[in-house]
Image: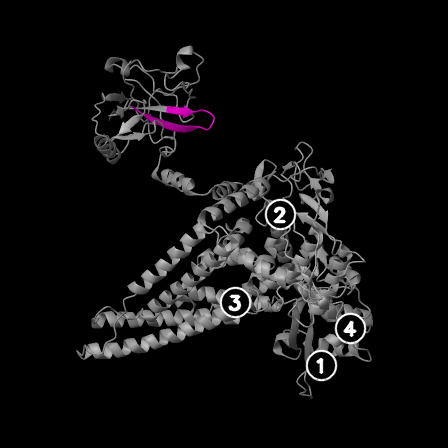
Amino acid sequence: MASYSSSSDDDEYDVPLGQLQKKIKVENIDKEDERQRKPLRAVSSSSPSSGDCGVGGRKRPNYREDSDDDGDGDDDDFVPPSPKKKEKKEKKEKRGGEKTVAPRIKMEDKDDKVDRTPKKSKIVVNREEKSVEKKKSPSKKDGSGKKKKNGKNISSSYSSQKSPSMPSSSTSSKKAGGTLKAMEKSERIAHGMQAHLWWDAPDPPEGCQWSKMEHAGVSFPESYVPHGVKMKYDGEEIELNPAEEEAATFFASMDPDGMHLGNPKTAPIFIKNFMNDFRAILGKNHIIQKFDKCDFGPIRRHLEEQKLVKKAITDIERKTNKGAKDAAMFKFGYALVDGHLEKVGNYNMEPPGAFRGRGEHPKMGKLKQRVSPEQVMINVSECAPAPRCTVPGRAWGEIRHDPTVQWLCQWTENINGQNKYMQLAAMSSFKGKSDRSKYNKAAKLCGNIDKIRADYKKNLTSKSHETRQLATAMWVIDRLALRVGGEKDTDEEADTVGCCSLRVEHLKFDPNGEGGDNREIELEFLGKDSMLFKQTIDFGSALYTEKNGMGEQVYENFKSFCKKKKPTDDVFSDLTPTILNAHLKGIMEGLTAKVFRTYNASKTLQDELTKTEQSASWGRMTASEKVVEYNNANREVAILCNHQRSVSKAQEANLEGLGAKLEKLKDQKKVLKKILKKVSSGENSGIPTRKDPAKMAAKAAAALEKAKSMKEKAKTKEEKIAATEADEKAKVLRRELADSKFNDAHLWDGVPRQDQVIKRIQTWTDKIKKMEMNIKHKDDNKEVSLGTSKLNYMDPRISVAFCKRNEVPIEKIFSKTLRDKFNWAMAVPPDWLFNEEIGKQG
């Protein structure tokens, strides 16, 4: 096929061939030639006649044959436009003040005929951008040669006009195409990445994590820009250089009433470490020596002002900032691994600052140094280009080609001397394979757990002290889900404790002083991440004694292990983490304390859900009520694994607000019952009606518009702070408006009918029930971290199968992050079970 040019000197007409992004220009031809002619699919041509389109010096585009041509010579891909679009075109021409009469072009194929009346226009396709620009024929021209429409000058090119949607053979395809167009770039990329099913892809060579890997390196934070605000020492302002000012700003940014400086236990540690590093930057002879004489107030006030200034950001500035953030994400946030795109997790280098740590970390307050490119090691495949360092005049420390590891970049931080890594995101194939292997290994324990328990139960009564200690530790790891633990240098790390590092001071026998045959021990120590483990274990209860649980024997063993020892002595004096781990691996390949925790978490969840599903009331429960039961099972797992969290002020305020709303709903229900009584008796006087919120709404809208205008006009710092304050006042008015609407939500504008009141009472009853359930759920879980169990310990396939069995939307159980992370688990059947057969999958 060849390129076609117009045979008319005066007019050129085009016909849209289907709902394509590219429109192809065609000419009017004779009817007798039409039947013999092949479908119009333009291809590349080097002929001089097709090189010039004769409009504005533009060259005529070349087209390639479409891939959907079936080669039968007909044009069965042609999709005519709807009659509504034709009517819109005709109306548009009439509004333009000019009637265009175009010849009818008849296009036929073997089965049908389609009549089209094209508009008078040209199509210019840009080959590089693959975009379509529509050039309309002139309606009127002024002396400058510009087109006029309704007496106004208009542009000759409509490059910003949307092109038609892509053709499709079905309605669903068209809808999908429209949805993709509406997505942002990041969403389209995520949508495309879902097409790669790593669990069906071939594995890399043995011992390797990947065959080819390419990425853009790590993104470094911007250099420090001095603000010039001076701190005070002994009442006098002190001049600081940029490095010194930056360190002072790190301390000033800390909340004086926060969890570090506001805590009498952690504040001295934080201040001591900070001053040691601060004086090292200042130098020995600097005037600043004592913290008591330092006043960081001026810098702290400056930072508070900057927060207010940032809140005064306009919509345009917000969009610009988002664009810059997205640009960094598109550059650094993706890696090419074995031919498919993967998302990178932490592509932003950690900025310098004051180290905070968790709990009573001995190094909190020390200054984290800025990481330079020379400290960073890059890992890419040999065939991939090394990423360009974005810091001018600097270079990477080392380029490696090691396919046996998963990390993309590596560096060493200065606080604890630990290696830090830039790795793929949690939804990546690397993490997915690791997670699936972890849960399958835990499932393998299903077939060995009886043998393991029989072994350590037998040894609980051994005459050998070492054997009894090992068996008792095994019981604790299995039944109490403790970690192994190990010796730590408390000058370098927080004093966190596991099974092997339990000290006598962590155990309190008979904590309530009941005496007699009491078998209770209170365990209290700091676990992982300095989270407090504080539980009273009744070793004589049925939970630990039934089915030969040996709880009472474990109690006696603990008592003997602590006898005649100092509070600081180890309980398991003859046991080390090395001995315990070696024993675990000897029982089953790959067995660790974490495998026990994963097994117990998954098994507990499955057993709790099964117990709930077998209850008599289960069939009558709604989806929301089933979600509550799932969360109850999840909470049991979190308590078992000691997954706790501290209650924030925001959580407390939220619970108080929900409680106040609940009381208001109950009061409103009482009012509705009084209204029903009056309406039923035919009495219409004294029935309260809804207040008109129009005035309050107008006031709130005006305040919001005023704040928006102030933000757009603000130039100076003072003007931006004033705009932020105006915005906060507008938000208060909006909250008051919302409260006013909520207070009158149960009322009507006039006197209601009896059936309306009855219906609203039922609605309020449902609202009260739902809110009570919500408050109970939030209150029960405020100190328990349900997310940690879902993320790391409970096999996600149990939850997916539960949702499928009970028609509960997976969105109610898993957030989008978890759904992306566990995409490999979404295809399990409703009757899937966590058992030994799963462990055989490896």
Marks 2 and 3 in Cβ contact (< 8 Å): no
Labels 2 and 3: the sequence-earlier one: 2
Q: Position of residue 214 (x, y in %)?
A: 63, 37
Labels 1 and 2: the sequence-earlier one: 2
In the picture of the structure, the residue carrying the numbered disc 3 is: 650
Horizontal placement of 500 versus 132: left or right?
Answer: right
In the picture of the structure, the residue carrying the numbered disc 4 is: 571
Q: Is 790 or 582 nearer to us in this picture? A: 790
Q: Nearer the viewer, mark 4 or mark 2?
A: 2
Labels 1 and 3: the sequence-earlier one: 1
- Determine which quarter of the picture holds residue 454: bottom right
Q: Main secondary structure of the magenta part?
A: strand
Q: Nearer the viewer, mark 1 or mark 3?
A: 3
Mark linked to residue 509: 1
Marks 4 and 2 in Cβ contact (< 8 Å): no
Q: Amino acid at mark 2?
A: Asn
Label 2, secondary structure: give it.
loop
